[in-house]
Amino acid sequence: MPPNPRSRLRVVLVAPRNPLNIGAAARAMYNFGFASLRVVNPYEVAFREAKSAVRAAPVLKAAEEFTTVADAVADCYLVIGSTSVGHRELHHPLRALEPAARIIRKRLQSDAVAILFGSEKFGLSNDDLSHCHWLLRIETAAPDQSMNLGQAVAVCLYELTRAARRPAAARREPKHASAAINEQITVMLLETLERSGYIKPLTSASSEDKTRRLVRRLNLSQRDSAVVLGMLRQILWKLR
């Protein structure tokens, strides 16, 4: 059985200071179906006993501890840092959460992805960010506001799972041009090419085949085919 894409997400908490926030993050992971929690240099070594986890004790128990961000993300193919931006100068592409979540969901289909969350007091350092491919930001009412660590993890994971819970909207495909319309375009295009001198008598047969295949590859809709026919009529009127 192929692995669940959610099993490929690594939630990485870098230098978290409050064990209650670690527990809240674990609870969010449990609620949204994620299990891989990684902690880099936690300030409080007793974080596994955080009461805020509420039924997420297995997530805390299985949490992996690392001394460096490099080790924590070593098996990941995409690493994203979360930031409130504030007044810092960024050297990475920055994406809002919703478009970022679309990219992450797609990559989780095949690759391990890590999202880094910094400490409550300082956020991610420049050294931490140097391990990231790009950054994401949860938009708040004011640009310089930041979220509580546990809340930030919950909001990100909610966004990652939101599309999966929402029924996909039926996509309405445009109605394509019929074979008869495609042939009409082909005939008019061939006449245009002959009258303009583009097609030579010796190569007319092969040119006709190439032109016909070209028109079919365009896969024109009914609306677009009407536009193309109008263009060709005007050109032929000028050439005749």
Image: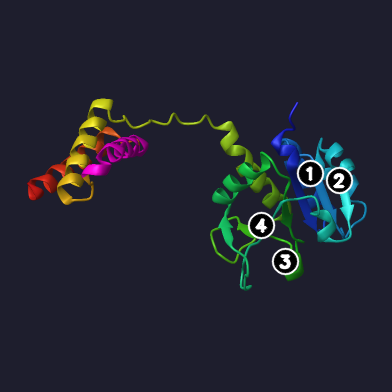
Q: Sort mark 3 into few (<14), some (14-19) or many (20+) by Cα contacts within 10 Å.
A: some
**How far apart are the two marked residues, 4 and 2, measured between alpha carbons?**
23 Å
- The residue tagged 1 is 26
Foreground of the two, 144 or 183: 183
Closer to viewer: mark 3 or mark 4: 3
The local secondary structure at tag 1 comes to helix
Reply yes or no: does residue 99 show up in magenta. Answer: no
Q: Position of residue 5 (x, y in %)?
A: 70, 37
Residue at image location 87% in from the left, 48% down from the top:
64
Q: Position of residue 188 (x, y in %)?
A: 18, 38
- The residue tagged 4 is 147
Q: Position of residue 236 (x, y in %)?
A: 12, 45
Query: Which color scheme does this rendered protein use?
Result: rainbow
Q: Sort mark 1 into few (<14), some (14-19) or many (20+) by Cα contacts within 10 Å.
A: many
Mark 4 or mark 1, which is nearer the start of the sequence? Answer: 1
143 displayed left or right of 25: left
Q: Is residue 90 above or below residue 117?
A: below
